[in-house]
Amino acid sequence: MSEFDESVGLGVITSVDGVELPFHCIAISDGSRKIEVGASVAFRVFPAVKGRVEASFVEKI
């Protein structure tokens, strides 16, 4: 994971192919609502508003 702002609950995951995907803290699967920058994560890509995509079901691995 490349960024996470705990105060607003928003982060960015950079996939192995270099695509940056935003996510909200409610997408973290363990319910903790926070995750460490640099943590390895698994996630699913889901459609968001206005044709964008975002990461969901974010899990620490």
Image: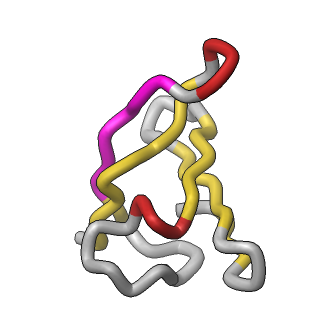
Residue 31 placement (x, y as % from top left): 32, 80
Chain part drawn in magenta:
42-47
Where is the C terminus found, in terms of image quarters? bottom left
Magenta region includes residue 46 = yes
Residue 38 placement (x, y as % from top left): 53, 73
Q: Is residue 22 above or below residue 34?
A: above
Residue 47 placement (x, y as % from top left): 47, 24
- Number of disc labels: 0
Q: Main secondary structure of the magenta part?
A: strand
Determine the residue positioned at 58% across, 76% down: 37
Lateral position of residue 34 relative to residue 44, left or right: right
Lateral position of residue 12 relative to residue 56, left or right: right
Residue 56 placement (x, y as % from top left): 39, 48
Determine the residue positioned at 64% across, 61% down: 11
Determine the residue positioned at 43% across, 39% down: 16
Q: Quadrant of residue 45?
A: top left
Q: Quadrant of residue 51?
A: top right
Determine the residue positioned at 44% across, 74% down: 39
